[in-house]
Image: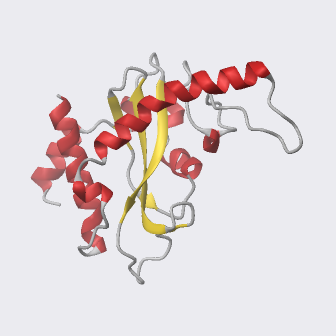
Amino acid sequence: MTPLLAQALRSVVPTAEELRADRQYIIDGTLLPCWSWTAVPGLWSGKHRTTGVVVQVAATLEGQLSWISDPTPGSRHDLHCLDQSGALDHLATYPPIGDKGYIGRGMLTPFKKQPGRELLDWQKTFNKSLNRTRATIERVIAHIKSWKVLHTDYRRPYATFKTTISAVIGLIFYALT
């Protein structure tokens, strides 16, 4: 990445530290697929049954894209990627909303059904309303993945993948300003 491009991206793309503590966010992870490079271990995602890198995405309750993390290998769990990004360190006032993969980090998550037990009616109602709210982040991710390079297998050399992702993310945020 050229120094000029790197500087331009830093000025447009928000970092985890720039997430506002007085806002509530919805957070979810998504896989950006790529070819299987034998020289790069850890790209295989068992969940998605393909290779790629994982990014975490944060959006406001209104559906405004607020932050996208740096890519991490696809074999890593969303919770690990979120911890690595440091985004939760800045969101103490209002707990972010997430899916069941984020249980245990102080986020608002749906209740899990325990083996041999049913969820109570109020837990089902809570899960339903929380999942309706979470639909916002799914739409935001779908909008991000409307960029062909982010939803099809990346076929160029792996060394250029992070630069390409960063450039596309920069363009996405530039379009929002």
Q: Is residue 115 above or below residue 51?
A: above
Q: How many marks?
A: 0
What x and y, as percent, mark residue 145? 30, 48
| Image-quadrant location for residue 142 | top left
Q: Identify the residue at horizontal 47%, vertical 46% (top origin).
A: 29
Q: Position of residue 49 (x, y in %)?
A: 51, 67
Left or right: 106 in relation to 23: right
**The C terminus - image quarter:** top left
**Dividing the image into 4 quarters, which one contains the N terminus?**
bottom left
| Residue sitting at x 46%, y 26% | 25
> Relative to 22, is 15 on the left or the right?
left
* Quadrant hosting residue 39: bottom left
Front one among 54 and 120 = 120
> x and y percent of residue 173 in the render?
22, 37
Say left or right for 106 vs 44.
Answer: right
User: Residue drawn 56% across and 24% down?
Assistant: 92
Q: Is residue 96 visible?
A: no
Above-or-below relation of 128 to 74:
above
Whether 54 is drawn above or below 9: the answer is below
Name the image quarter holding residue 114. top right
Which colouring convention does the figure follow?
A: secondary structure
Q: Nearer the viewer, residue 161 or 152?
A: 152
Q: Position of residue 129 (x, y in %)?
A: 59, 21
- Single out the residue that lies furthest toward the bottom: 38
**Furthest residue toward right:** 116
Residue reaching furthest left? 4
Q: Is residue 166 visible?
A: yes
Q: Residue at x 54, y 50 (%)?
A: 78
103 versus 54 height, above or below: above
